[in-house]
Amino acid sequence: MTTRAEQYAQAVYAALMALASPPTLKALQLDGLPEGGDVVDWLQNHAPEWDGYAAFPDDSRAWAVAELKKLAKSAELTPAKTAKPTLAGLAGADSSVFDWEKPNALETQTPPVQALPLQIIPEPFRAWLADVSHRMQTPPDFATVSALVITSSVIGAGCAMRPKRFDDWEVIPNLWGACIGRPSVVLKSPSMKEPVSLLERLQADYGDKFERDKAAAEFDKIANDAMLDDVKGKIKSAAKGNGKDGVVETGKIAKLKADYLELSAHAEPEASRRLFKTNETSIQSMTKLNNENPRGLLVFRDELMGLLAGWDREDKADERAYFLEGWNGNGSYTDVKIGRGLTDAKNICISLLGGIQPDKLKRYLYQALQGDNDGLMQRLQLAVWPDEPTEWALIDTVPDKAEKQRAYSIIKTLAELDFIQYGATQGEYDARPYFRFDDDGQAVFNEWLTEWQTVKLTREENPLMVEHLGKFRSLMPSLALIFHCIDIADGKAHGAVSATAAWLAVDWCDYLESHARRIYAMAESPEHEAAVKLASKIKAKALPNPFTGKTVYDKGWHGLKDRQDVEAACNILIDENWLIMTRKRTTGNRGRPPLPKYHINPVFL
């Protein structure tokens, strides 16, 4: 049990340590004191005539000062060997600890992030997405980013954007997006699935159409095969010659050849179902799907980190490279397998969307910062990590079905749109139709790109941010084209991409840059953020004194679930004078050595 003197010493120590310039303290346990005694009792033992109130006798003062200095010097030289408790020990620390310094302040290094302004949400989607986020009481960022990614996947390689006035450089407007947030707090999964449900509905509609068309396609194939069989029979007959002389009629053979080639050329292909979304990622399956869906399709993963981490494995290196190529939207791939034969996809276009938990992302980013970076993370251009809501209200209203239907109609129209009819251009040697900016839009892009290349990128010091912002060179025109196509499908645009769409894309680049800075700041110092979280638990007195690292990560606190994170956080708090670590000496017996103990600065006790 702590005595009243020990409690007093602890309080005095905590008060002194809280000073702006705390003194260096030495604590002495003086011999021969009665219960509750102090330095006055010790002095009276050596000067019995002194009453404890008057001035200390001059003839004893020199001796007392010399004796106290001697004891202090002895304690300073061998504090760990003495059995006498020190002041730090009385304050709750281990007996081997002697001095505490004032703890330094710890603040989060996570930069602020720009909230999504509703005015930069494309107007045809604005009311629908605002309704979704309001009913869920969650940031609108997740639903909006998801809506843009699925829209980009529907457009896919169906058309391109050529951002310069004359150059043939073009970008395919397929995008990768990630919604970052703590599970069950910001409802990122329900927010993503609301827009994804439109894509699933579109896929189901095309599935019904496929079932209706399949029977007709099968009939046409049977009829065509029958005619081909008839021609084959006639070819065999003609090849035997005419009559007894066996002369082959070359004219008849030529006619049959022409019939055979015409029937083969006009043979109905086997019916295939158009898909818009998949959870599949294998190279063979994705190649087959891209061959049947040349515009491309969306890969959706509710938990995206499992996919990204899986690609780090050596046996997944080819799949990783395949997806990196699929991000460009204009690559090709030929797969040859003995059992399956040849699958030749002339265009590989992959959009990607999923959710990520911050704890799982930070280690992945930290490894990328250490040099293991091939640009995969930078391709998640629509990665957002909004602030968690500080207020909540129970909302129970009827969904805005009219605005949701409007959004679905736009998605469906884009899936079937002939872009050339709405102002796109396609020359004889162009792989796909393409748009350019109008005069005002071109001026916006030229000014933005010049500043981006000569100012923004040259001043950036974070290597991951440099690579991330470097890919905005294609992101800005891709977004401008997507916004333009949304307006086309809504009946509000035609022809070249306008300045309005270009400025909206610029606003989105500014918004996404702030989120990228928050994301990559976590990669620069994940240990610091863990230390901030642990410090908050210490101030809340949620830990015993002393504690072990296992005490912390067994609690499963956010950001402090892994041993490595906890140990790194404790090391930082030691440097900042929040903790002191002690280890018990091993006894020489075999077995696991005892865990180190972390003692808390008495200021927080």
Image (cartoon, helix red, strand yellow):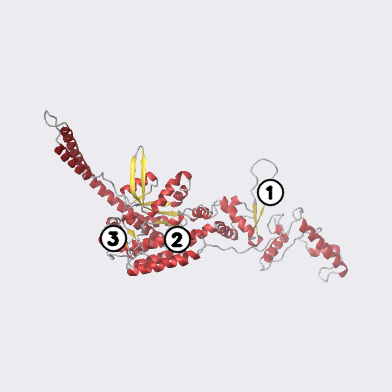
Q: Nearer the viewer, mark 1 or mark 3?
A: 3
| CA distance for labels 2 and 3 | 28 Å
Nearest to N terminus: mark 2 or mark 1: 2
Q: Specify the quadrant of the image occupied by residue 604.
A: bottom right
| Residue 444 x/y as whole percent | 37, 69
Q: On screen, 352 above or below 62?
A: above
Q: Amino acid at mark 1?
A: Lys
Q: SS for tag 1? A: loop
- The residue beneath circle 3 is 425
Furthest-right residue in view?
59
Residue at image x 43%, y 46%? 318
Q: Amino acid at mark 2?
A: Gly
Q: Amino acid at mark 3?
A: Thr
Nearest to N terminus: mark 2 or mark 3: 3
Q: Which mark is residue 470?
A: 2
Q: Nearer the viewer, residue 401 or 430?
A: 430
| Residue 301 x/y as whole percent | 41, 51
- The residue beneath circle 1 is 584
Can residue 563 be seen here?
Answer: yes
Q: On screen, 240 above or below 402?
A: above
- Counting labels gives 3
Q: Residues within 10 Å of mark 3 (few under 14, many from 20)?
A: some
Can residue 394 be seen here?
Answer: no
Residue at image x 44%, y 52%? 304
Residue at image x 42%, y 52%? 324
Q: Residues within 10 Å of mark 1 (few under 14, many from 20)?
A: few
| CA distance for labels 2 and 1 | 52 Å
